Amino acid sequence: MITNLKESQEILKNKGLKPTYQRLRILEYLEKHKIHPTVDMIYQELLKEIPTISKTTIYNTLNSLAQKGIISGITITGVETRYEYKELPHHHFLCKSCGKVFDIPVRCPYFDKKEIPGFKVEELQGYFKGICKECLRKKK
């Protein structure tokens, strides 16, 4: 987890990326908004502060950060990718009512091993779909 600007700069440099203003702002946004945002969500928010930023810059930056293992993309719905800092392996829960994605601390033996006999595992994702606590409360 990144805690400050200097640490963000070091992470980028250590991964061979220049610590550009856009990269630093996107990392900061992901750190402060653990909502598993989409490209559009990040773009709409950063556009308020950086009027010259383009959606292409957001896409390219997120792809670079993901390729270097700094962040990860999560595709649960099949129509959009959401982004988060790459942290310890965990599952996700997609609320089919409000669309929010939550981190779920469920233990999975394959997450720990990162291997399945006879296969080469390059990515692990586990997710659940249903109705979140907040939406269930609203329905009552």
Image (tube, helix red, strand yellow):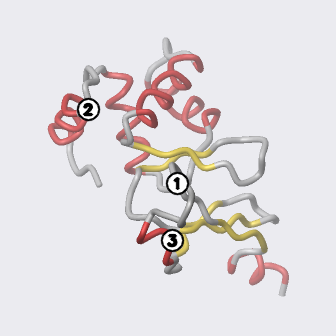
Report the side of 62 relative to 10 (left or right). Answer: right
Image depth: mark 2 or mark 1 in front: 1
Q: Are marks 1 and 3 in contact (CB under 8 Å)?
A: yes
Residue position for label 3: 110
Split into 4 quadrants, where in the image is the C terminus? Answer: bottom right
Report the side of 133 relative to 71 (left or right). Answer: right
Q: Amino acid at mark 2?
A: Lys
* Residue drawn at 78 percent across, 73 percent down: 130
Mark before the other along the chain sequence, 3 or 2: 2
Tag 2's secondary structure? loop
Front-lying residue, 113 or 2: 113
Mark before the other along the chain sequence, 2 or 1: 2
Distance (Cα) linking label 2 and label 1: 22 Å
Determine the residue located farthest toward the front in the rendered image: 118
Residue position for label 2: 15
Tag 3's secondary structure? helix
Residue 15 picture location, percent across and down: 26, 32
Tag 1's secondary structure? loop
Residue position for label 1: 121
| Quadrant assignment, res 119 | bottom right
* Residue drawn at 48 percent across, 56 percent down: 34
- Total numbered badges shown on the rendered structure: 3
Determine the residue located farthest toward the top in the rendered image: 52
Front-lying residue, 90 or 50: 90
Distance (Cα) linking label 3 and label 2: 26 Å
Split into 4 quadrants, where in the image is the N terminus? Answer: bottom left
Residue 84 picture location, percent across and down: 48, 49
Residue 58 picture location, percent across and down: 52, 25
Distance (Cα) linking label 1 and label 3: 10 Å
Q: Amino acid at mark 3?
A: Tyr
